[in-house]
Image (cartoon, rainbow, N blue to C red):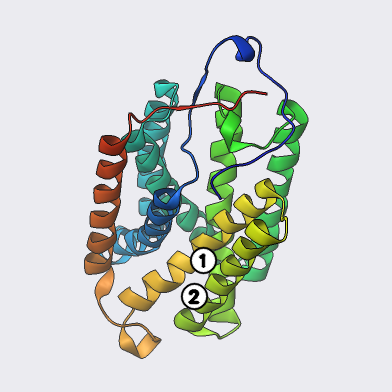
Amino acid sequence: MTSMTDTIRPLPGLRDRQVPNRVPKVTWDFWLIKLMAVTMGETAADFLAVNMKLGLTATSLLMAVVLAVALVLQFAQKRYVPAWYWLAVVLVSIVGTLITDNLTDNFGVPLMVTTVLFAVALAATFLAWFTVEGTLSIHQVTTTRREGFYWLAILLTFALGTAAGDLTAERFGLGYEAAGILFGLIIASLSLGYFFLGLDAILGFWLVYILTRPLGASFGDLLSQPTQYGGLGLGTIVTSALFLAVIVATVAYMSLARDGEEFADAA
């Protein structure tokens, strides 16, 4: 999904000047690094909470603070800078995972309830975003308010994806591999719908963005979890390191292959 055409409310003076967009274009490397980020979010959260023995609560508080700092730095850029943007995405992925894990493990909220809860919260965010800004286009994230809506939506997609993925793999008993294949098939169907059947670009983008979370988490768990739990037993350290290496390499490519600045589409 490399482009989106939608009705937008133009910013003052937009026709007279190019305004830097604060988020990247949707290209193949966008989806590659996004999938790696969500996978690492799953394994990194487990590594900090279990392997480092920080516990779920301490890990959540620590990562929330780190994310807040990263978002301050991201908002300060006023344009798309690959390193800062993707650092924020990785941290949002970890925190989104931890939010769902806390509700499930510490507060005993069923996964079915958290899935519905985050779906409703995400829908409400989109409604508020569109009501205030007149668009949900990621090609027009050019103001602080729009970027605020964008990152709130991103956080909720990770929390929702975590809940939906765990619900499918664990509570419905599909297992990590089958759940990953299921979500992959759904994403493939949405992609075919976009390219050949006229699926709305904005709807398609956000659905795929949500579903890449459980897809990545399912394969992350498949690689990291012990064999007695249906995994391959690589462990969270090795799995996290592998995906971190891919993320760093892809961000380096993004930074070198382009100037890091995207511009908003004109109305």
If the image is split into quadrants, where does the C terminus sit? top right
Which residue is pictured at 69% across the width and 51% down the height?
A: 203
> Does residue 175 sit above or below 256 in this rendering?
below
Tell me the amino acid under the disc marked 2. Gly
Q: Say which mark, if any, is on residue 180.
A: 2
How many numbered circles does the render carry?
2
Q: Is residue 239 left or right of residue 164?
A: left
Place residue 62 in its image quadrant.
top left
Residue 258 position in % (x across, y down): 33, 34
Crowding at label 1, few (<14), some or many (≥20) Cα neighbours within 10 Å?
A: many
Task: Tell me whether circle 1 and circle 2 mark residues in contact (CB < 8 Å).
Answer: yes
Tell me, yes or no, if residue 107 can be seen here: no
Crowding at label 2, few (<14), some or many (≥20) Cα neighbours within 10 Å?
A: many
Place residue 197 in its image quadrant.
bottom right
Residue 53 position in % (x across, y down): 27, 62
Residue that sits furthest to the front in the current view:
196
Residue 158 position in % (x across, y down): 52, 54
Place residue 171 in its image quadrant.
bottom right
Q: Secondary structure at mark 1?
A: helix
Q: Say which mark, if any, is on residue 214.
A: 1
Tell me the amino acid under the disc marked 1. Pro
> Does residue 147 sit above or below 230 in this rendering?
above
Which residue is pictured at 55% across the width and 24% down the height?
A: 142
Residue 181 position in % (x across, y down): 51, 78
Which residue is pictured at 71% across the width and 37% down the height?
A: 6
Q: Is residue 69 left or right of residue 109?
A: left
Of the pair 252 and 146, the residue shown nearer to us: 252
